[in-house]
Image (cartoon, rainbow, N blue to C red):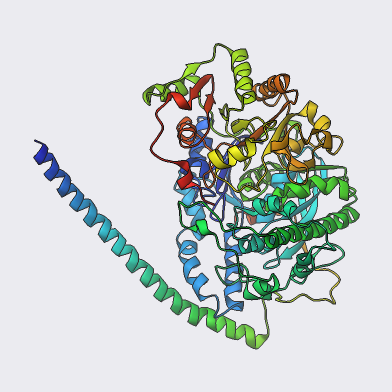
Amino acid sequence: MNIHKKKQGSVALFFVGTQQGIKSFGENIQTLVNTLLLSIVYFVGVGIAWLMCKLSKRTFFAEKPRPEATTYWEPMDLKKRPMEEYRRQF
Amino acid sequence: MYILGISCYYHDASAALLKDGMVVAAAEEERFTRKKHDTSFPINAITYCLKSQCITMGQIDYVGFYEKPFLKFERLLGQHVQMFPWSLKTFVSAMPSWIHEKLRIRKSIKKLGYQGEVYFIEHHLAHAAASFLVSPFKKAAILTADGVGEWSTTTWGIGNENEIQLLGEIRFPHSLGLLYSTITAYLGFSVNNSEYKVMGLAPYGDMHKKTNLYYEKLKQVIDIKEDGSYTLDLKYFKYHYANRMPSRAMEKLLDGPTRKREGEKKGSGKESELTQRHKDIAAALQLILEEAMTAMLKDLYKKTQCKNIVLGGGVALNSVYNGKVLGKTLFKRMWIHPNPSDGGSSIGVASYIYHTILDKKREKRHQLSHAYLGPAFSTEEIQQFLDARGIKYSKFKNRQDLIASTAKMIFENKVVGWFQGKMEWGPRALGSRSILANPCNPRAKALLNEKVKHREHFRPFAPAVCADDALKYFDCDKPLPEITDFMLMVYPIKKEWHKTIPSVTHVDGSGRLQTISRKQNPLYYDVIKAFGKLSKAPILINTSFNIRGEPIVCTPADAYTCMMGTGIDCLVMDTFLIQRSDNEQDQWNSEQYAND
């Protein structure tokens, strides 16, 4: 009876182990593919955008303080808007 | 009308439920998943909110999300473009979660069975709403400051009745919150978690601007204008393109490499030594934060001429500075949400939908007067748990017995786990899931640090005092601000009491007090008063019911496990008393789990 249970246990363990192994293998492949694809997107997409920004001298943020500036506050006017605007994710 | 607010995917995911504008339930996801600062979609917190009102997702009228995901994504892309090619690693690691979940938040919400529209508001607007709309003020000046939202890192504005107008911002990567986090990382503590440790370390350093060498050095990193607006010199930082926060230039400036934690390997729990240099750096950082905040608030008063101020965002958790605001500026009253960082934004967005978008008037009942918004367990549920687990326990005869026995145990220097009623909202234990101890015992701090909390020796413990006794023991603002109820203010302890309550007196003579009124939490209030009759000082040590690295306990099972794995002597859970010595100790030892 006990031996039978033990055998059942080892068989179940084998399948669980195999399942975990396959899952882990799948995840590794996914990471690899993601890295590869995202690297391509980065060098092509982000790289081209960077080049265009360099040519047009556009920056997204200042990297150095501006001693001549009197304030670093940037004006904003965030107040109640029409309801539809809150349904947008941007 | 039910409105559900959700915040997630950055840190401290949470959900909050409003019924006709009143907050009826709110909780952070970490309490259910037992992962500290859990960022994942708060399915457990949502389930709790719905269960608390016996409703389903189909009965929710509006759902709000605490930021605009596409605006944040735009900022992220802007960062990568500007920092090309140095940002490759962060781009590759961050993009999958954006593609798979962060940009699909609407879909995740709809999957729960919600049929209506999802409303999105800006991150700092959610912070402002969380603070202003549930505050006692009809009109107030607003200042929010945190790490970063979409683009904003600091904003100012005005709240008037049920409307908020944000009028100025400082944009990423220039951020007071991220400066504080960078130095936190430099000092070897974890980011978005241990900033309060740096605040606690600061008084051990030189708090004088003229003599602290690192004050002048850190001033090179940030340029603060007269109106408090600031910018950072990015050569000292790497967070805008790498997974590391301080740059080599910062390490050179601060005379040494980033402090490494020996305890990084799970289990050792010990950090490398903190030297006087580290303490001085922490002090310099605190000085700079206070300087910038004071200048901003003074300027804000000039611009708004408003006597009330509300603060929001993670920087508002700097309780040392909070305690100084009214003394250093012309503001007369102040309010801060009990959970001012991202977690609290779920209440922010829900309140904004109710009051501002739907144009509902603010009334007194909408004010957040307490933080007991989490799950509670009935006496029957707790007894069922104890019986099912075969736990040995006794039952208090009545309420008086519970109060007198608990006060006596604390007076006899026992460490008491205190599990009563609804779990607190926010990062502080406020007398529902607390560990209580005797502040008059000079060894209590060391005992709690070593045997229970496994935390750094320099961190102070907080005193809990009844509101009517606070002015006797503390040099507080007068009148006492309501937010002392939320343990958000540090005040000096009056000198004559330093020796009486040594275990809650920090090295600089201050204490981060929590005040309790009888109306708010009668049982806790009565225990403190009963302890006062025995000790002549009605003050208790109140620290969160957890060990370092774990979220505060939520369920009876969490509380029992925490007690049995630590040096907590007994657990007062509802009307039951569970003695550690009566029960078989679990195999696990909490010390091995103690981590940052």
The residue shown at (45%, 51%) is B267
x, y percent for residue B362: 75, 37
Quadrant of the drawing holding the N terminus of chain B:
top right
Q: Is B258 displayed left or right of B537 in the figure?
A: left
The reply to whether residue B313 is in sight is no
Q: Is residue B155 above or below residue B516?
A: below
Return the residue nearer the eye: B536 or A45.
B536
Q: Is residue B560 above or below residue B306?
A: above
Return the residue nearer the eye: B466 or B90.
B466
The residue shown at (45%, 65%) is B96
Q: Is residue B594 above or below residue B464?
A: below
x, y percent for residue A26: 30, 63
Q: Is B76 displayed left or right of A3 in the figure?
A: right
Q: Is B101 displayed left or right of B17 in the figure?
A: left
Q: Quadrant of residue B278?
A: bottom right
x, y percent for residue B111: 44, 48
The residue shown at (62%, 13%) is B400
The reply to whether residue B587 is in sight is yes
